[in-house]
Image: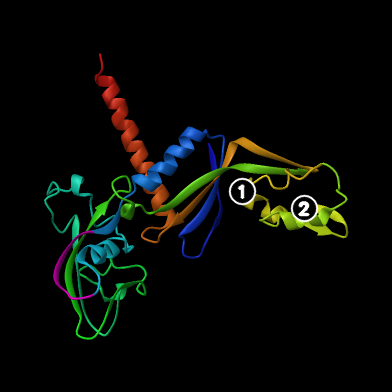
Amino acid sequence: MEARLLEQNKEKTRASLMFRKVSIPYLNTIRRFMMEEVPVMAVDVVEFKKNSSALYDEIVAHRIGLLPLKTDLKSYALPSKCTCKGEGCARCQLKLTLKGKGPGIVYASDMKSKDPAVKPLYPDMPIVKLLDDQEIELVAIATLGQGKNHAKWSPGLFYYKNKPALTIKKNPSNPEVYSELCPKKIFENKNGSLIINKDKVMSCHLCGACTDLKGSVIELEESQDEFILFMESWGQLSCKEIATKATDFFDEQISEFVEKLKELK
């Protein structure tokens, strides 16, 4: 298998990778491990002391549970793998507090964490609006969790596509139609000639609009052993951390499977 990085943003929360000589089942397994197995921090328990806002406790708790929290995988463990066996300790849980009084909006930045390394990623996310004399006070417990148990523990969005290959069989009489039709603007009309912008070919999402035209001169092919994997992290972890952790979990489960097979007689 061959893999190389195509692009990555400055924050390292979005990236795309090219894979060659790999099967769809293997690539899809890695994708699912990224989405469902790699753990991140999220609030799981909320204890309200005061809430005179217009929102029910359950609604506020749901909003807080969906707040993305910066995650430190080196300092925390999954409750199932913690030495406390899931009973709750500083190794697998983190306490956050929230206190606010109206009038005004309570934001994610008002959440106070006992660990400065784990805090809301987007401080301007609103939690609740308080009117005059309305108050809210609560204690939240965040734990490491996995996306297979709840979406709030999924670290991001991951998907792949076959590598596209586009060919212009001959110059059409209406090149402007092709250049306007393509949603990704891959085709360009230059002085009556239709050309392919090579810098944008990889952005083709295989919609087939260019080949659906009557008498189309475009040939679109999908590679069966070359794929582009897209990673969009919510920000709790970098794309590199997610990919590395996903392969670690994959290797761990494969090793466990092999050991189980050896026990069979």
Residue at 67 percent of width and 44 percent of height:
208
From the top left corner, tell me how far across and down residue 81 is, in percent.
20, 45
| Numbered range of the magenta stretch | 44-53
The circle on residue 205 is: 1
Residue in view at x 46 percent, y 39 percent: 28
What percent of the width, then of the height, locates residue 264?
A: 26, 17
Within the magenta stretch, is there residue 47? yes
Task: Kindly identify the amino acid type of the residue bearing the numbered disc 1.
Answer: His
Query: Hey, what amino acid is under mark 2?
Result: Tyr
Q: In the depicted view, which residue is nearer to us: 129 or 24?
A: 129
Q: Residue at x 79, y 55 (%)?
A: 177
Magenta segment's dominant SS is: strand
In the picture as drawn, the residue positioned furthest to the top comes out as 265
Identify residue for label 2: 178
Element class at badge 1? loop
Q: Earlier in the sequence, mark 2 or mark 1?
A: 2
- Pinpoint residue 146: horizontal percent, then vertical percent: 30, 48
